[in-house]
């Protein structure tokens, strides 16, 4: 009988109930919230559902030494997490993004790339705030990239500059990407007048196939020469777009923009979520990172909208830009552009801004990769 009790006691020690702490329960609750928002609210379900379930996986209380946790060498989760920790997944995501992106709106109106550049001030604003709060320069750079509204870029840069903060940075970046409509709309309404929201923009010109093919080649050479450290992201982004626009590699483009990006998105979401183990994730630094992430989104949206208003000072009547597309300068494609469309239709149900907003939105994708390259070059 004593042997039976000893066996039961040993079994109990291996269960999650025996090893559970309040921190585990808090993180499991967070994972459930993410899943609920993804399914019920449909806020970026392709991101929030894998991340939410990953958070639950990473916070099942484990008996030490089982070698199944994400931070234990040789475990399955640890092997999958190498793609995040070593920055393998983000370039593959960018390959898929490039294969799905149409740069026509930007090619037809190249001046709108300036909006995408202005919105990157969210990155550098958050960087300066993080320095003021006591983070080291490399940590501040990794935190600042959250303002680009680009989860893969945030993972790539934090894996190089501050791997110990990667879990908090990645979850913060993806969380705020899902909350783009909630965060941006009040700022857009606050910074614009009713008259400005009613501005109608002329239809973009037609872009030839030759221009679409030349753009990724010239775009890559120009950006890579300016910021060579952004090569992994910029190279894959423009290569994916060339596969799409060349017209002779349709199978490769379909694979990159379909099955490949779906698999990598699933793995990156699940492992990023699992990396938020309670003993590693719950800290004052994590709370500060979430606060700085929100600040960076606010700064990025504010600068994007205000920069359009500044540009309009030099535009003739009839050629002005609707400042509602200023929010789309962040890299959250196409969600930020959809916010421009939604807010624009609320002001005038016949004024569609989606096509126009896609120009600064895709410029934001390039801009966030360039900004990451700048930070990596200076701080890496």
Image (cartoon, rainbow, N blue to C red):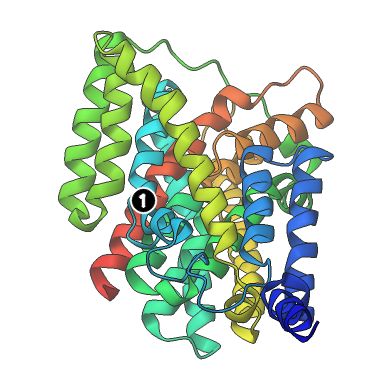
Whole-percent x, y for residue 89 in the image: 38, 47
At 28% from the left and 33% from the top, the residue drawn is: 238
Q: For residue 171, which quarter of the picture?
A: bottom right
Whole-percent x, y for residue 165 in the image: 49, 74
Give 323 or 132, whichever is nearer the viewer.
132
On screen, residue 212 versus residue 106, left or right, reads left
At 52% from the left and 80% from the top, the residue drawn is: 130
Give 2 or 61, whichever is nearer the viewer.
2
At 83% from the left and 30% from the top, the residue drawn is: 346
At 51% from the left and 64% from the top, the residue drawn is: 68
Asked if one can make out residue 355 in the rendered structure from this viewpoint, the answer is: yes
* Crowd around label 1: few <14 · some 14–19 · many ≥20 (10 Å): many
Is residue 222 shown above or below 295?
Answer: above
- Exactly how many numbered labels are in the figure? 1
Which secondary structure lies at badge 1? helix
Give 283 or 119, whichever is nearer the viewer.
283
Whole-percent x, y for residue 249 in the image: 26, 13
On screen, residue 332 versus residue 284, left or right, reads left
**In this figure, which residue is indicated by the disc labeled 1?**
369
Is residue 60 shown above or below 370?
Answer: below
On screen, residue 49 versus residue 111, left or right, reads right
Is residue 359 shown above or below 373?
Answer: above
């Amino acid at each position: 009988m004593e042997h039976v009790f000893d066996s039961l006691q040993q079994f109990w020690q291996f269960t999650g109930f025996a090893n559970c702490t309040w921190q585990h329960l808090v993180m499991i609750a967070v994972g459930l919230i993410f899943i609920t928002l993804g399914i019920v609210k449909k806020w970026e379900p392709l991101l929030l559902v894998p991340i939410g379930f990953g958070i639950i996986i990473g916070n099942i209380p484990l008996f030490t030494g089982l070698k199944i946790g994400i931070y234990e060498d040789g475990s399955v989760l640890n092997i999958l997490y190498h793609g995040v920790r070593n920055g393998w997944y983000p370039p593959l995501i960018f390959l898929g993004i490039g294969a799905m992106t149409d740069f026509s709106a930007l090619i037809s109106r190249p001046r709108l790339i300036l909006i995408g550049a202005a919105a990157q001030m969210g990155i550098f604003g958050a960087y300066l705030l993080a320095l003021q709060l006591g983070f080291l320069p490399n940590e501040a750079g990794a935190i600042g990239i959250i303002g680009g509204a680009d989860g893969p870029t945030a993972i790539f840069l934090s894996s190089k500059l501050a791997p110990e903060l990667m879990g908090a940075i990645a979850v913060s970046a993806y969380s705020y990407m899902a909350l783009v409509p909630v965060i941006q709309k009040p700022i857009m309404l606050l910074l614009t007048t009713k008259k400005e929201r009613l501005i109608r923009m002329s239809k973009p010109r037609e872009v030839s196939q030759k221009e679409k093919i030349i753009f990724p080649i010239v775009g890559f050479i120009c950006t890579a020469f300016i910021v060579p450290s952004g090569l992994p992201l910029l190279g894959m982004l423009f290569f994916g777009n060339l596969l799409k626009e060349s017209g002779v590699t349709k199978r490769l483009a379909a694979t990159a923009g379909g099955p490949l990006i779906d698999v990598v998105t699933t793995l990156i979401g699940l492992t990023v979520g699992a990396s938020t183990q309670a003993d590693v994730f719950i800290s004052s630094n994590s709370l500060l990172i979430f606060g700085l992430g929100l600040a960076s989104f606010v700064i990025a949206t504010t600068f994007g909208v205000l920069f359009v208003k500044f540009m309009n000072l030099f535009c003739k009547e009839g050629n002005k830009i609707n400042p509602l597309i200023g929010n789309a300068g962040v890299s959250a494609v196409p969600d930020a552009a959809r916010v421009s469309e939604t807010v624009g239709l609320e002001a005038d149900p016949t004024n569609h801004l989606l096509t126009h907003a896609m120009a600064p939105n895709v410029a934001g994708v390039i801009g966030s990769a360039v900004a990451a390259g700048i930070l990596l070059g200076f701080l890496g």
